[in-house]
Image (cartoon, helix red, strand yellow):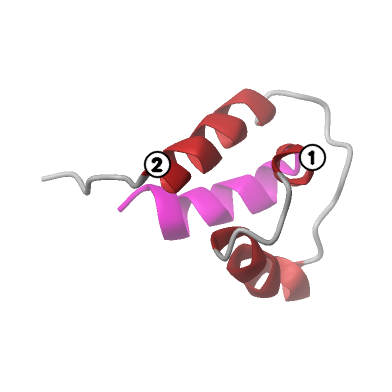
Amino acid sequence: MTKQLTNWERSVRTIAEHSKDKKMTRKVDTYEYQDLADCIRMDQVPASEIAEIFTDKTYYAWYKKKYLDK
């Protein structure tokens, strides 16, 4: 059974899916992963910045596994 996503989660997933194949424009350091995820999940990061952040394929994979693939 898959989890029902909220409108906000669907929006983040859409932004992520559209960003994942773009050339990386921003690298996220591993020590920032959780803090950045918390800010994204509290809606403190603008959509344009989320799109840029998710061009880091390693971070996107981590975020997706932790928050979107449940």
Q: Is residue 23 magenta?
A: no
Q: Quadrant of residue 28?
A: bottom right
The image quadrant where one finds the N terminus is top left
Q: Nearer the viewer, mark 2 or mark 1?
A: 2
Which badge, 2 or 1, is on the more N-terminal residue?
Answer: 2
Q: From the viewer's perspective, is 67 left or right of 46?
A: left
Residue at the (55%, 61%) spot, across then down: 41
Amino acid at circle 1: Glu
State the image coordinates of residue 56 (x, y, percent, origin top left): 75, 44
State the image coordinates of residue 49 (x, y, percent, origin top left): 78, 45
Q: Nearer the viewer, residue 15 or 70?
A: 15
Secondary structure found at label 1: helix
Q: Is residue 46 above or below residue 39?
A: above
Secondary structure found at label 2: helix
State the image coordinates of residue 40 (x, y, percent, origin top left): 62, 59
State if disc 1 and disc 2 touch (CB < 8 Å).
no
Crowding at label 2, few (<14), some or many (≥20) Cα neighbours within 10 Å?
Answer: few
Most extreme residue toward the right is 25
Mark identifier at residue 40: none
Boundaries of the magenta span: 54-70
Residue occupied by mark 2: 7
CA gap, disc 2 to disc 1?
20 Å
Most extreme residue toward the left is 1
Crowding at label 1, few (<14), some or many (≥20) Cα neighbours within 10 Å?
Answer: some
Residue at the (85%, 51%) spot, across then down: 27
What secondary structure do most residues of the magenta stretch adopt? Answer: helix
Residue at the (68%, 29%) spot, across then down: 19
Mark identifier at residue 52: 1
